[in-house]
Image (spheres, grey):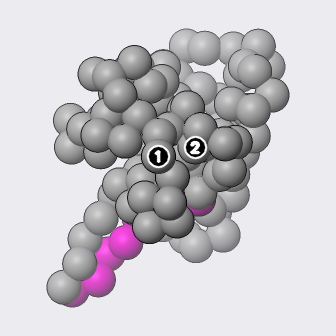
């Protein structure tokens, strides 16, 4: 487990934003990504009959649609212990294999940090 208080303030910010998206929208996951300019993109799980996206893939899509060229970091707040390979692949496609993905529980405590690679 990672001590969330020891996180860089910008990483703590994206965890907080992801947690807020999850709570505000009542969805299973919330996510936030930070692009190369420091802009953040926040999303929750999308569960429509015709479209299903995890929160992290939605946040990456929002970054791409807004013109982001790269990612510095990503965070997901989830009840799961880790993120799927598909979620990591989306982060890797935009940010590269070394992009950190912070995985936090619903309480906002970071459980683990993995790379997108």
Q: Residue at x 30, y 64 (%)?
A: 53
Residue 69 disc label: 1
> Does 69 sit above or below residue 85?
below
Q: Residue at x 73, y 19 (%)?
A: 7
Q: Is residue 85 toward the left or the right of residue 29 in the image?
A: left
Q: Residue at x 69, y 58 (%)?
A: 20
> Image quadrant for the N terminus?
top right
Residue 88 percent across, percent down from the top left: 30, 35
Q: Is residue 24 visible?
A: yes
> Image quadrant for the C terminus?
top left
User: Which of these two is toward me, 76 or 66?
Assistant: 66
Crowding near pointer 1: few (<14 within 10 Å), some, many (20+)?
few
> For residue 109, what is the image quadrant?
top right
Q: Which circle's residue, 2 or 1, is located before the other in the chain?
A: 2
Q: Is residue 112 toward the left or the right of residue 8 in the image?
A: left
Q: CA distance from mark 2 to mark 1?
A: 7 Å
Residue 8 percent across, percent down from the top left: 75, 21
Q: Residue at x 48, y 24 (%)?
A: 100
Is-magenta flag for residue 103? no
Is-magenta flag for residue 43? yes
Q: Is residue 91 toward the left or the right of residue 77 in the image?
A: left
> Does 104 sit above or below residue 64?
above
**SS at badge 2:** strand
Give the magenta part as a residue range: 42-49
Residue 65 percent across, percent down from the top left: 44, 67
**SS at badge 1:** loop
Residue 35 disc label: 2
Crowding near pointer 2: few (<14 within 10 Å), some, many (20+)?
many
Check if mark 2's residue and mark 1's residue have beta carbons within 8 Å: yes
User: Which of these two is toward me, 2 or 8?
Assistant: 8
């Amino acid at each position: 487990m990672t001590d969330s208080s020891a996180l860089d303030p910008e990483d703590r910010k994206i965890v907080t934003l992801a947690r807020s998206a999850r709570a505000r929208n009542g969805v299973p996951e919330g996510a936030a990504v930070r692009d190369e300019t420091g802009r953040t993109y926040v999303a929750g799980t999308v569960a429509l009959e015709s479209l299903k996206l995890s929160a992290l893939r939605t946040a990456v899509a929002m970054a791409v649609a807004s013109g982001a060229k790269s990612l510095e970091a990503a965070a997901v707040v989830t009840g799961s212990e880790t993120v799927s390979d598909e979620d990591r692949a989306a982060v890797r496609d935009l940010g590269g294999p070394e992009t950190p993905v912070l995985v936090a529980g619903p309480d906002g405590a970071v459980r683990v940090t993995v790379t997108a690679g």
